[in-house]
Each structure stands twice: as C-alpha cells, then as structure tokens.
Amino acid sequence: MAVLEIKNVTKQFGGLIALNDVSFSVEEGEIRGLIGPNGAGKSTMFKNIAGFYTPTDGSVIYRGQNIAGKSPHAIAEMGIVRTFQETTLFQELTVFENALVGSHITAKTDLFSAILGLDKAKQTAANEKVMEVLDFMGLSDRKDQLASELPLGSQRALAISIALVSEPRLMLMDEPFAGMNPEETNHMMDLTCKVRESGITIILVEHDMKAVMGLCHYLTVLNFGQLLAEGTPEEIRNNERVIEAYLGGAN
Amino acid sequence: MNSRLKKIIGSLVLLATLVAIPHFLKFHHQDLLIFLTINVLVVASYRIVTLTGEWSLIHAVMMGVGGYTATLLFKNFDLGMWFTLPLAGGVSALIAALLCFPLFRMTQFYFLIGSFAAGEAIRLVWIQYVNPFGGTGGLSGVEPPIIGGIDFLDAIPYYYLALTVVGFCLFILYRIENSRIGLTLHAVHWKAPLAESVGVDTWRYRALAFVIGSFFVGIAGALKVHYLGTITPNQFGIGFMVFILIWVIVGGYNRFYGPIIGVVVLTVFDESIRSFAEIRPAIYGAVLIISILFLPKGLESIPAKFKAWFGIGSNSDAPPLADK
C-alpha cells in the first residue's frame, strides 16, 4: 500500500515553476531515492511534503489524507519528520538535550504538570527513549557533549536521532551524505538501513550516487521541476534520458 | 562536603541575609529595597519572554496593566491584596494572549517595534480615558493590606511580604524554565525550523512564553502599586523598559540568575553614586558601556572567567546555553 502519494504537485514562486505537475507514490517500508541535477526541485518537493511550503496545485496524500498546506508541526504529529540539508542542530545544547527535543510529541506537557512535577513518568519515559535511540545510533558515549563539538558524521547521526526520537512513520532525509568521507558514508549507510529495518519508510534526497544506488529500492528522478524517470537503481543507471540530464545532452 | 549540603547551607545563608538586610538600612534605602525586590520579578519574568529569542518592548506596560488592574479592583470593588495580586497577573496574561494574534505574526526587529507600538497604545488608553484610569495624573489611594494586626504600610513588613510573593513567583519561573517547556522554548529560539519538524508549534510556544512573562510582571505591577499607593502612565513608559533591557543585558541572559544579578548590582551601584549628583547618569552610562564591551555575556560570566584565568574547573562549568 502506498504510504505517500504525490498527485500533480506544482509549486510556483512568482514566474518560476519549481515543480511542474509531479506525481509519484512511495510504498510502505521502502527506501526511496529522490535524485536529479541541482535545481531539479528535490528540496522543494521535500518542503511541500513536510509542510514548509504549500503546493500551488496538487495534493500530497499521506495514508489516505491530503496533508498539502498543513503546518510542519501538524504534519510531524502525523508521523512525517524531515531532517535538514545542512547540519541543523541545537548547537548550544548537549547531544542528550538535542535528542530530547525530538520527544516533543510524545512527552508534551502542560504548564501545571511542569510546575508541579506531575509529568515525571512521561519525562522518564522520554529520557529512556532518548537513550535507546542514542544507543542505536552509537552516540550514547557522547551524550553530554555539546552538539557543536561533534565531528560531522556524528552531527548527522544526531540529526537523525532527533527525528527518530519523535517516532516517525515516514522520514525525509535531505542529503545526509553531503560532505562525508567514504568511511563516514559507509557508516551512515548502515545507520540508514537500520532505521528502515526498524519499520520506518525513508525518502532520501541525495547526490552521492554510491549511497543512493546502494541503499534505495526505487528511484524517482526529477529534472527542471518535472518527473524525468522512475525505476530501480539498475534501470535508472541505464536510462538514457537520465544520463543526458546529468551529463548534459550532446546537440 | 557534598553538593546538596552546600546548596542547603547556601540557601539558608541567602535567606538569612535577605531577612536581616532591611534592619541595617535607613528608611530611604528600605524603600529602595522593596522596589528592587519587585524589579527582580520584573527581570526574571522578562527572561522567560526572551527565552524564545523575542525581545519585546511591552513588558513595562504589562507591569502597568497589572498595576492598574490592582488599583481599580481595590478602589472599586474593595478587593484585598490576596485577590488583586493574582487577578492583576490574570488580566495582564489575558491582554498578552489577545496581543499574541497580531504580534506573533512578526519576528525579530518587527516584533520589537510592534510590541512597542502595542504598549504605547495601551498607555494612551490610560492617558485618554480619565475615567476610570485617571489620565496623566493617574490614580492614588491604593493601600497595602492589614493582616493579623500587622500594618503592611511599614517598609519592613511590606518588604517581607514582597519577598515572599517574589520568591514564590521565582520558584515557579525556575520550575518552568527547567522543565520540558523550558527546553522547548530554548529549541524554538535556536532553530525554529528544526523544532517545527519534530512537532513543536513554535507560534504556541512563543505565545506561551509571552503570556507567562506578562502574568508574572502583572503581579509585580500590583505589588508595586500596593506599596507606592499611586499609579501613573509614565511609570511604565519606554524609560523604564530601557532599564529592564539594561538590567537583563548587563546581568547576562544565558542563565536564570543573570538578569537578577544585573538588577541587584546596577541598583546598588546607582545608589552608591548618588552623591555625584549631576554626573551620575554619565558614570552610569560609562559603566554600562564598559561592562557590555568587556563582559558581553554579562556579569554572570565573571565566575567562569575567574575560573578560566586560574585554571580551576573545566568545560563542564561553561554555561549550558552559552553563545557559540
């Protein structure tokens, strides 16, 4: 069953058409790669799904419900969580506190419980969940370090941890491999597989072809805001239109 | 000695000092001590607003809202202080909640100016509507309570009363900041989109901080008017707001107690240069500039700096939410 269906999504910024009538759907439990040259509209598509943009036209159907135009926090509550392109973290907080922010939905509290300490059980459960995720992502040794002190690979792992603590059903990962060395890339690929095995559907925007080809079950290729091709990594690798888009067409 | 014991002893010493202090002061200084105690609540409640990264210019006016509420309730309905205090906070919070709708469509600089404009509008209402607000001359005749034969018009009993109320409010503010709500407010400040992506309704939390801050500063306003007996629109003008900003910035806003240190140190300092008369504002200004230049993280960062110079302690002493 399709978890997410993108139906005829168009996004216009003034005269610029960033996405033009794009449709595709994502199945439960897969790792979907969303690729394309720079400016193809991948990040715009992500922002439309996660609620940071409202599509000019078309709908985003998540488990049978149109979520286009909902606010990011409402979409997060429904189980869709995105990670960010750059290392967007709470640099001033510790690793543990960073991940704890992720438990907002499950451990949300009201003013009076917070003042009187009535929400202790909830907060203890949240702390345990955070430790579980940090263990899972191999960050538990660093839990008291400031996020800004972490090496790049661990910062990305922390970004994913924050998302995981919020117990998403669908995770949108925006270039998690950018700027990584081969070793870090391998580690991150393992982590991504582990995340999927824990039952989370993943959509991945990525330029690192090794990672994309190695991880994804199915690829969706965008070019100039339009759907260019869809298929397995093998099919896409041999698709002439895709090769042309990436390498530039010979006139 | 374990840290828990140290904390208990520290609190007891602090409490004893606070209780003993007015007995060593002249009458004029006892007055000042009461206003200082109230101003501690003003800056501490302002801090919770700034936690989300929004600096408002309406805090002083919100204090006035509390003050006027207490005055009107006292004069028209003969309500005692135990009713006027929470109701003053409640009305401030309510007005803040209504203002959230226009104000939190803006952020940063625009929010700053928007909050200033909203505050001036409220002040103009006090000036224009002589009935019931008394116009420019304000209102007078508010009295402190008499409880169990103790007349709180005297400075020392009123100081203890204010100290109790402020202490209780600080305790609640501290609890809020150190709860999950405090963490979420920090998160909204530092990376709003990331907070949004894990389900934080940033609008709601900005509004929540603003309403909580206004509630407590409303109580501070009521405390002030019950002692002073009179209230005028000019007490809550931009001049007082600038003082609030100065106290918070000079004290440092990375920790709960920073603004409190700021208001205490600057008030004592300002009083100690009273004999310089005409050049007093100049000295005050110079000290402000120097402290901001050399202590950008505020007075609260002095202990950490000392430790760094003498090589005591380690990174773990760094403020948890210090700037990069």
Image (tube, coloured by chain):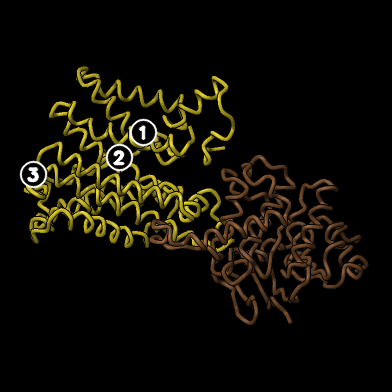
Chain colours: A brown, B yellow
Viewer-side label of 1, 3:
3
Q: How many marks?
A: 3
- Could you classify mark 1 by the number of other residues whose Cα lies within 10 Å: few (under 14), some (14-19), or many (20 or more)? many
Q: Which chain letter matches label 2? A: B
Same chain under badges 1 and 3? The reply is yes
Viewer-side label of 2, 3:
3
* Relative height, residue A7 to residue B185 (above, below): below
Q: Residue furthest top?
A: B276
Residue located beneath label 3 in the image: B151
Circles 2, 1 touching at the beta carbon (< 8 Å):
no
Q: CA distance from mark 2 to mark 1?
A: 9 Å
Secondary structure under the numbered disc 2 in the rendered image:
helix
Circles 2, 3 touching at the beta carbon (< 8 Å):
no
Mark 2 and mark 3 lie on one chain; the one further toward the N terminus is 2
Q: x%, y% of residue B98?
A: 32, 62
Secondary structure under the numbered disc 3 in the rendered image:
strand
* Relative height, residue B9 to residue A90 (above, below): above
Res B154 → quadrant: top left
Judge from the rendering whether residue B160 lies leftward or rightward of residue A186; answer left or right: left
Q: Which mark is residue B261?
A: 1
Judge from the rendering whether residue A84 lies leftward or rightward of residue B234; answer left or right: right
Residue type (three-letter) at the residue carrying disc 1? Ile
- Say which residue appears at 24% left-offset and 59% top-offset: B91
Residue type (three-letter) at the residue carrying disc 2? Val
Q: CA distance from mark 2 to mark 3?
A: 24 Å
Residue located beneath label 2 in the image: B40
Secondary structure under the numbered disc 1 in the rendered image:
helix
Q: x%, y% of residue B85?
A: 21, 54
Mark 1 and mark 3 lie on one chain; the one further toward the N terminus is 3
- Could you classify mark 3 by the number of other residues whose Cα lies within 10 Å: few (under 14), some (14-19), or many (20 or more)? few
Task: Indicate the quadrant containing the C terminus of chain A: top left, top right, bottom left or bottom right.
Answer: bottom right
Which residue is at the front of the view, A107 or A204? Answer: A107
